[in-house]
Structure formats: C-alpha cells, structure tokens
Amino acid sequence: MSELTQASELVRVTQVPFRNSKATVIRGVPVREDQTFASANYNVSIVANSEYLPVDPTPGQIWRVAGHKRTYVYDHGKIKAQEHQYRKPDTLEFYLPDTGETFIQFISDDKAFKGIGNRKARQLWARFGEDIHRMLTAGTRNDFNALSELLSTQSIQALHAGYEKYANLRHTTWMSKARIPHAVQKRILKYHGLGTVEAIKSDPYKLLHFGLSFKDVESILNHRFGHAWQQKRYPKERIQAGMIQALNDRMHDGSTWVKASQLLTRASDYLKSYPDREAGIEWLNESPRIF
C-alpha cells in the first residue's frame, strides 16, 4: 500500500457508483485550473461523508478535493493505470463551471436541467459566456428577454429550476467546511433563508435552534479554530448557549420548572467555569423570554 501524501486537485466527476446517507463514492478525471482535461495517466476516487456535501455529485461537475491521498497502480497487461484515492478528504468543494466546454457538459449532463441538451447549452455559452451565472441567480426582466431569444419559456423555467440547487453554494460551501450536517444546511436554507446563514456565521451557537447540541457546536468550533478558541471567540454567546442547553436537558427530562442550583449543576457539564455559570444564571434572570 502506498504512503499517504498531502495533495489538492480539481476533478471532473465521471461516475457516482455509490451514495447513501453516510458515504458517497465519487470517481473522476483530473482537470487543470482552466478545467480542461489534465492527464490520461490516472483517475481519482473519493470517498466522502455524505452529510457534509453541499450538493449531490453528478457526472460533469467539477470539484476540488484536498487532503491525504494514496496512489494505487493497477497492471492491465501492457497498460498500467493509476488511481489517486482520497478517503474523507479535508475539503471537497463544488465549482461552478467557468469555461465553455465545462459549462456545456455541466448543463447537458446534469438531470436538474431537464430538456436542455448540448446544442442549447452551447448556444447559451456562445451568447452570454460567464455572465450566464449572474443571469440565472440574480437575473432581471431584461435577462429573461435575452434568454427567450434562444429558449422557450418552458426551457428557461427548467434552467432556473436547475440553478436553484446551486444558487446557495457559497453558503453551503462555508457550512460544509464548518462540518454543519447536510440535513441542517438544507433546513436552514429552505425555511430560514440567507439571513440566518449570516447570523450563524456571527454566532454559531444559534445552531442549537436547528437541532444541534451544545457539544455539537463545540466540536464544529474546535474543528475550525482549534481547542483554544473559547478564550477569544463568542464568550457571551457560549455562556448563553450553555444555559439554554441545560434548560433543554431539564425539559427533556420532563421537568416544567427547575431550581437555580439544579441548573448550575447541569450547566457545569458544558461551561465548566464557575464564573461562566454564574454569569449564565444572571443572564437567565434578566431574560424572561428565552425561546
């Protein structure tokens, strides 16, 4: 078995042979920064955690993978083939295509863009180039009129519908890097919008309102900032979240009221520091409406 080495490369997806709620296997070929084919000497295999993927991988998409890889050599008689294999990479980011051929392949291969084939995709890129991304994510009536010169109303609707799942990628990419579970990402974007994403960036402890526990959020922050983050980031937010978690714990136990001493005991599992627990009780006393 080859040694693990640190690497980063762009990959065009050719196949997604396996996917369930826990793991996704992606196979592809390496491409250059201009997204043209890079090498016929090897292919790329990625085993990723499905929970953290911002969108479902499909053939034709471009992804950047970074992390530790192993290189395997397969002997097929006169031909030797290599495979770069990544298991649970550090990052796996989706790239919207920014060259003509990759855009054409992206649109014509992805089932999200129903009814728009290679010829129409080629015409769109020839006419609008990279501006097509703006037109489909923040377009105006003039943009619709320009598209209608090439596409029917039904095809334009299909194009916009396909783009909806990619419209929030800059936010889902951030959330995926932060190790926020995919199910939580979808719930935030579907029901709460982009303002909530910005609020979570400012205070990650707001994730408690989306089904994550205090310890889940601590784990996310440890991953992003290292274990020394508590002393410098979100001090008030952390205290408040610890107290809310302690209250949630008591309510899940069936309690409808709780003594301050009992709450302090429960909060000690999260806040550890006695001054932080005292500050939390004071905050609760001054906050008649927590939920």
Image (cartoon, rainbow, N blue to C red):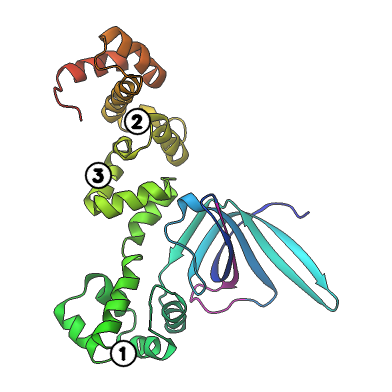
Kindly identify which residue carries mark 1: 127
Q: Tell me which numbered mark, 3 or 2, is placed earlier along the sequence.
A: 3
Residue 34 highlighted magenta (yes or no): yes
Residue ranking furthest to the front: 254
- Residue 140, quarter of the rendered image: bottom left
The local crowd at label 2, few if under 14, some if 14 to 19, many if 20 or more residues have their Cα within 10 Å, is: few
The local crowd at label 1, few if under 14, some if 14 to 19, many if 20 or more residues have their Cα within 10 Å, is: few
Q: Tell me which numbered mark, 3 or 1, is placed earlier along the sequence.
A: 1
Q: Which residues are magenta?
A: 23-38
In this rendering, the answer to whether 215 lies above or below 28 is: above
Kindly identify which residue carries mark 2: 232
In this rendering, the answer to whether 10 lies above or below 213 is: below
Residue 244, image x and y in percent?
28, 25
**Residue at 42% across, 57% down:** 54
Kindly identify which residue carries mark 3: 199
Residue 78 highlighted magenta (yes or no): no
Q: Secondary structure at mark 1?
A: helix
Q: Secondary structure at mark 3?
A: helix
In this rendering, the answer to whether 243 lies above or below 167 is: above
From the viewer's perspective, tell me whether residue 155 is left or right of residue 56.
left
Residue 15, image x and y in percent?
58, 70
Label 3, label 1: how far apart the Cα atoms are:
38 Å
**Residue at 36% across, 91% down:** 123
Residues marked 3 and 2 touching at CB (< 8 Å): no
From the viewer's perspective, tell me whether residue 48 is left or right of residue 185.
right
Residue 251, image x and y in percent?
30, 22
